[in-house]
Image: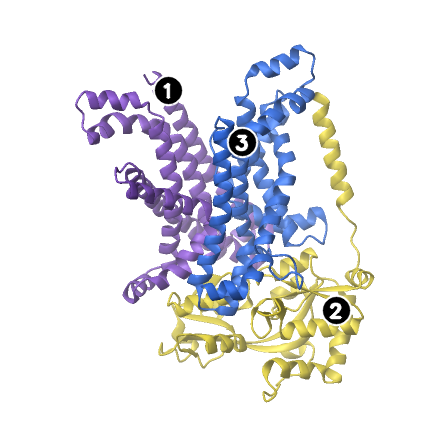
Chain colours: A blue, B purple, C yellow
Amino acid sequence: MLEIINDYWLFFLIGQYPNGPIGGLAGTLLLATVCVILALPCSMLIAIGRTGTNRFWRGITFLIVYVMRGTPFLMIIFWAHFLGPLVFGNSLGPFWVMVIALVLYESAYLAEVIRAGIQALPYGQAEGAKALGFSRARTMTLIVLPQVMYSSFPALLSQFVSIIKETSLGFVIGVHEFTFAASQVNSILLVQPVEIYAILGLTFFIVCFAFTSAARWLERKIGKSQGVSLS
Amino acid sequence: MDFGSISVLNEPYLTWLLQGLRLTFALFIFAWIIAFVMGFLLLLLRMSPIKVISWIPSIYIELARNIPLLVQIMFWYFAMPMLLPEFLQQALNRGDSGFILASLALGFCMAAYFSESFRSGVRSINSTQVEASRALGFSFLRTMQYIVFPQALRATIPLIMNNTLLLFKNTSIAMAIGVHELMYQVLSINNDTFRTFEIFFIATIAYLFFSVLIMIAGEFAERWAKKSRRTSNA
Amino acid sequence: MRTLGIKIAALATGAFIAVTPAQADKLDDVMSAGKLRCGVISAAKPFGFLDAKTREVVGYDIDFCKAVATRMGVEIEIVPISVEGRIPELQQGSIDVLAAALGYSAARDEQVDYTLSYYVGVQMVMSREGAGFNDLASLAGKSIGTAKGSSTEQYVRDIIPTAEVASYQDIPAAFLALVQGKIDAVAMTDVIAAELKEKSPKPLEFVPEPLKFEPWGIAAAEGETRLVEKVDAALAAMEADGEAEEIYHTWFGASKERNFKIVPISDYLK
């Protein structure tokens, strides 16, 4: 197994770059990071809709969350694969299709984490803001969300681990990430699946376990746990 | 995109879809049973007084929860059999190895989640309950049987329903190793007919329908759990 | 808060409208960008496979792409894609042409436009040695592995209706399943199978009766006639001055005789 790591480590790490798109572990982490950056604002909007007073937005966000919770992620990937380019234009490669799928799916889950955080915040905070004349929008942006983001951070970090794991499904539509890089090495070596999948699994384990442990440590530091992890 | 002639539901595609649905359920049931039993075993191992034994579940759970399910399934299907002795490999191949290995992979992975849910449920019970029952002369096993588990069940069921939903959705990943479940059939039909929107729409409705059933069952379970815990733990 | 929702909806609609582009002819896009994006497969030696040292995808298909691009006067961008994603990616426009072991079929012809045929392949079935499959009929009821989205799936279903088709994510996965005894046989292009047979730890053998004779073409999205004409012109020029034959011998060996020429696919359909 060590010879394989020795021969192909650069490929596992960054895929074919610069002779091709960025892949490998770098591709995976890039996908996950881009997803979080785009999904967080969306999920905040959804969470606000879910806890708001407007029945229309409550209904729509409720639907979004429950459709995403009820559909297998693989199905959403294929939807994004076939519909994404129709909506967003022609040059959408697998990377951005995967980003769209991840953002759609994960904003719903992140929204649930944030919603739990919003509902766990003592009502006195929002009451005080209202008494001081803050509009609902300003209450959210200046009072509620900053505190919620701070206290939900461990749960959000756990969700980030789920995002990293979900990027591996991009393999089925040819996204250049870590699992795809492993399959390409597999196509050269052909009959060493044990070593290749062991390398794949252990690397994911090391990366994800590092983040999970960080999340646990942060949770202890912050001192309160935030609701049920949805993954 | 034409909805007029629902050609995707004609033969032979309808048979494919139904076969896919059947396999999805079979995979779901087998994997659920494996996950439940293994999850329970892991819980018992955790409670062992011997330190080394109580660490095994922790290692197992961390591995299962931090490695993507796709990677786990591919490992079970392609790599794991090569570690088995020849006669076991052949026995496996005589059956439907894809289905068996996918069930095992899915079951063992979700066992970690089930075990964490069980643990959450058990921990929700105040330790004074256990102390009191031991003081009254209940053995460890009887304490578990009559005091802890019945109450833990009520806390655990909502979490288990959540895990069950996840397990159901994750059956779709078995398509990567050639198991003819619903997702696999959907892609086969699409490759044949190119009627992408139709077939994906139908399949999404199918998945949503059963997911919603599980979610509704979960809601009922959660309400029953809250109702039964009227009295707070002393 | 009441107006916040309306503002968000307006923003979203505006963004949606702004981002949806107008359609343009693909050839114009290629020429103005100065780049031809060519979709290839990266796990089918010798047509498209990964070179371990250079971390580049190389092969017969890639060389054809590069030569066509040079003759068209544009740069080449090689985009490795999955077997299953070949036609969808082409239809969605993330690639301009496909040189990805795409066999001709009437169903596919409705989805894409084919150029002249640049390779003629034979689909064969391969099993473990000693399995005793002497002809295609003996495979009735057996499990045959293919790559998901390949034309082979349809051929097996048409020619051996009772066989069980097991489709994997790529060709090496199907091959591994065969070696591990999970399936009875695999079906794919003969030269790809021959490469795998060489590397196989367990002895494999071909079923003597060929499954299907299949001309391959470079494909462009449906309706892109100008692009197809340009590629056809390049291919014809390559045939005329011998470059096509040179590429063949690079990948198939100097001694192997090339038993086809670059002609329209319709020639084979008569």
Circle 1 residue: B227
Question: Left or right: where does residue A13 sit relative to residue A205?
Answer: right
Question: Disc 1: which chain?
Answer: B
Residue shown at 37% from the left, 46% from the top: B60
- Residue A18 appears anywhere in the view: yes
The residue wearing badge 2 is C228
Residue beneath the point at 39% across and 56% down: B76
Tag 2, which secondary structure?
A: helix
Q: Quadrant of residue B136?
A: top left
Say what secondary structure mark 3 lies in: helix
Query: Looking at the image, is mark 3 or mark 2 nearer the viewer?
Result: 3
Circle nearer the viewer, 2 or 1: 1
Above or below, A105 relative to C90: above
Separation (CA) of disc 3 from disc 2: 51 Å
How many residues crowd around disc 2 within 10 Å: few (fewer than 14), some, or many (20 or more)?
Answer: many
Dot 3 crowding, Cα within 10 Å, few <14, some 14–19, many 20+: many
Residue found 73% across the figure and 77% down from its top? C235
Q: Are marks 2 and 1 in contact (CB under 8 Å)?
A: no
B32 sits left or right of C80 in the view: left
Q: Amino acid at mark 3?
A: Val
Q: Are marks 3 and 1 on the same chain?
A: no
Query: Which chain letter matches label 2?
Result: C
Q: Nearer the viewer, residue B96 or B177?
A: B177
Residue at numbered disc 3: A113
CA distance separating discs 2 and 1: 70 Å
